[in-house]
Image (cartoon, grey):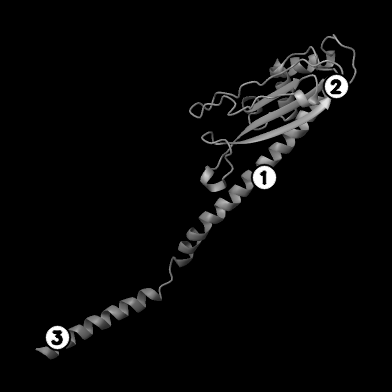
Amino acid sequence: MIMGRTSFTGRAWRRASALRDRYSKNTDGATAVEFAMVSLPFLAIIFGILELALVFFTGSVLTQSMNDTGRLVRVGAFQGCGSAAEFKAMVCDRMQGMMSCENNLRVDLVTAASFQSVAMKDPGDGGLDPDDDTKGVENGEFDNTGPGEPVVMRGTFYYPLVLPNFMTRLENQPGTGRHVITVSTAFRNEPFPGGGSCNPSIKDELEGILG
């Protein structure tokens, strides 16, 4: 009786060992499993790098566009042509409308008696509604500056992130899914003749942009 049990146990153990050896040597599908394990974090890194590159590119284009449009204010060519909405339209036109510029850009342009006394409000979340993607950013402050006045100009772009924040940690405006890009510059207006009307070329450009 004891010998029978021992024989049965031995056969069961040999069968289990044979199955173990069989499946341990079977590598079918191992490559696919390994690729799946490695590809997800690899692709996450690649897409994260691409999004970070787009953030930097948008910031560079915004800087150039703000400087180009701000130069019109500095020489007195924009005065009399409008306010924040028209100024933003010209900035976005120079950005080629990238990243839905009209909905995501806030422009502030203010003046004071001196650079030290210039005060600008915190743009905060720009009036964005996380539950309403169609709502655009609120327009900022805009002063109609005169000759020789100190001017501080700021562009705040609420870049809409594609990837979730846990993958890139680029969201710097909590709860909005946005990365806020801020571009600021200060200058003193040229001593242009005051009280003039809108420069005809700027007026024509605005009519072409705004329709």
Q: Earlier in the sequence, mark 3 or mark 2?
A: 3
Picture layout, residue 160 above or below residue 93: below
User: Which residue has dot 3 on it?
Assistant: 5
Q: Residue furthest front?
A: 116
Q: Residue furthest bottom?
A: 3
- Residue 199 in the image, given as x and y percentages of width and height: 84, 14
Q: Nearer the viewer, residue 27 or 162?
A: 162
For the residue carrying disc 3, how many other residues have a C-alpha within 10 Å: few (<14), some (14-19), or many (20+)?
Answer: few
User: Which residue has dot 1 on it?
Assistant: 53
Type of amino acid at the residue the image marks with label 3: Arg
Type of amino acid at the residue the image marks with label 2: Asn
Q: Secondary structure at mark 2?
A: loop
User: Which residue has dot 2 on it?
Assistant: 189
Q: Nearer the viewer, residue 123 or 37?
A: 123
- Residue 154 in the image, given as x and y percentages of width and height: 72, 28
Marks 1 and 2 in Cβ contact (< 8 Å): no
Picture layout, residue 178 above or below residue 153: below
Residue at screen point 87% across, 19% down? 148
User: Gap in Å between the C-alphas at discs 3 and 1?
Assistant: 70 Å
Q: Is residue 54 left or right of residue 153?
A: left
